Image (spheres, grey):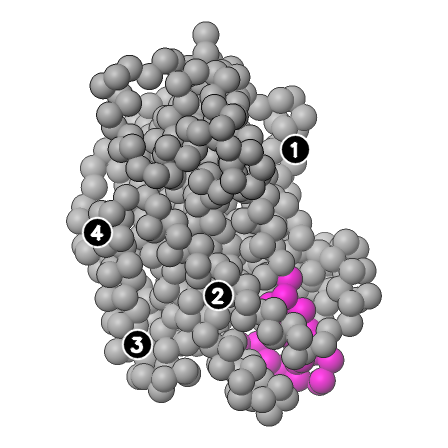
Amino acid sequence: MSPIQPVTDTEALIQKPNKTVIACRAAIDGQRKGLRALLPFLGPAFIASIAYIDPGNYATNIQGGSQFGFKLLWVIVLANLIGMFVQNMSAKLGIATGKDLPEMCRDYFPKGITLTLWGFSEIAAMATDLAEFLGATLALNLLFHIPMLPAALLTGVTTFLILTLERFGFRPMEKFIASFVFVIGFCYLIEMFLSKPNISQIAYHSVVPWIGNSESILLIVGIIGATVMPHVVYLHSGLTKNRIVPRNDTEAIKISRYSTQEVIIAMSLAGLINLSMMTMAAAVFYQTGNSQVADIESAYQTLTPLLGSAAASVFLISLLASGISSSTVGTMAGQIIMQGFVGFTIPVWLRRVITMLPAIIIVALGFDPTRTLVISQVALSLVLPIPIIALIYFTRRKDIMGVLVNKPIVNVLAILCAAVVLILNFILIYQTLGGPQPF
């Protein structure tokens, strides 16, 4: 029996008849065609995509490009394909069930397992916020010469103010976050024009794998952790679960198709931005003999004499937009994780304070921000298999997903995605414990 049940009049009142919902209904009913039909469905994947271009990506991509040139571009392509696949499953779960992934875990798993998953998910959320806070703080410090500690506090206040947009419904927040994605994309379009990279090298290394040494393996795992984010896998199902509620199986299929199109668009844009980050680092630093550029601050300082102050400023503007917007999304995800797994919420301001504390401590103690960012992304990659495996478990079940259940080939590809992450993590742990280079 399909889990999609007809919506009663009482349930329909949950969805306020705003312009976006009306436009979506018109598209579902065939009254809007082409791009006009797709536009009102754009939003959830763009919110999710900001986590794919957060400051953790800057740290891993700059370090990878400056140290190894174009050789790790294939990792970005692989990570983005995995991310696109996983985010689509997460969005589909919310549409089919009307629940987010943490809620499904609480409903179907034993309490002990649910609490364990919650614990690991909170660690992932903390690691995420650490990267995002440090990125925005560093951008404020370098761009406006604000001391690191006041810059961190300013970041916290700014993200909290942005979160207040949620009181006006889902659409203002979607538009606001999407605008940040396009700002970051425009900034890197400028950087690509100024750096003039070798197109043939980009094309070759985007599809030909290269492993390298233990340091490159650390970056490979970090890049995947920075791209496919555990917290946003949970978040995406929460963004779609009640956005447009399907009234029957036919509507569920149509909504899912529009959602898939949006995921492809948003994640492709995020992937291109990530490729641009590493490409710029490879073209500007690696090919000019500046392979020692392994952190965001030295990247900014090196960009100024190589490409000019305008290029360096554009780089920092994109980093600031990335840090502030992704930190906002991280707080949203944290709320869904807590509410879904354990059934209670805390005020947004308190959540904001708790998740920013690790970043404040690191800033106050004077740790290297970029190295901390890379390590945080490795931690995210270690946690990543958990939500992927949970997604596979739920989306392959006909009794849960109904007409939106995974096709057999989708299940195979999903298992391969989880296997890739697990294998890379095993290699990282093996080497960390002193094992010899396996390649």
Q: Could you tell me the amino acid type at mark 2? A: Val
What is the C-alpha distance between the residues marked 1 and 3? 43 Å
> Which residue position holds label 1?
413
Identity of the residue drawn at 44% across and 45% down = 43
From the image, state whether disc 2 or disc 1 is nearer to you. 2
Name the image quarter holding the N terminus: top left
- Prevailing SS of the magenta stretch: helix
Judged from the image, the secondary structure of the residue bearing numbered disc 2 is helix
From the image, state whether disc 3 or disc 2 is nearer to you. 2
* Residue 391 seen by the camera: no
Question: Camera-side residue: 319 or 367?
Answer: 319
Identity of the residue drawn at 43% across and 33% down = 24
* Image-based side of 368 in relation to 300, left or right: left
* Residue 75 seen by the camera: yes
Is 435 part of what is drawn in magenta? no
Is there CB contact under 8 Å for labels 4 and 1?
A: no
Query: Is residue 80 depicted above or below 311 in this figure?
Result: above
> Which residue position holds label 2?
183
- Magenta residues, start to end: 275-295
Is there CB contact under 8 Å for labels 2 and 1?
A: no
> Which residue position holds label 4?
348
The local crowd at label 1, few if under 14, some if 14 to 19, many if 20 or more residues have their Cα within 10 Å, is few
Mark closest to the chain's N terminus, 3 or 4? 3
What is the C-alpha distance between the residues marked 4 and 1? 37 Å
Q: Could you tell me the amino acid type at mark 1? A: Leu
The quadrant where residue 194 appears: bottom right
> Which residue position holds label 3?
151
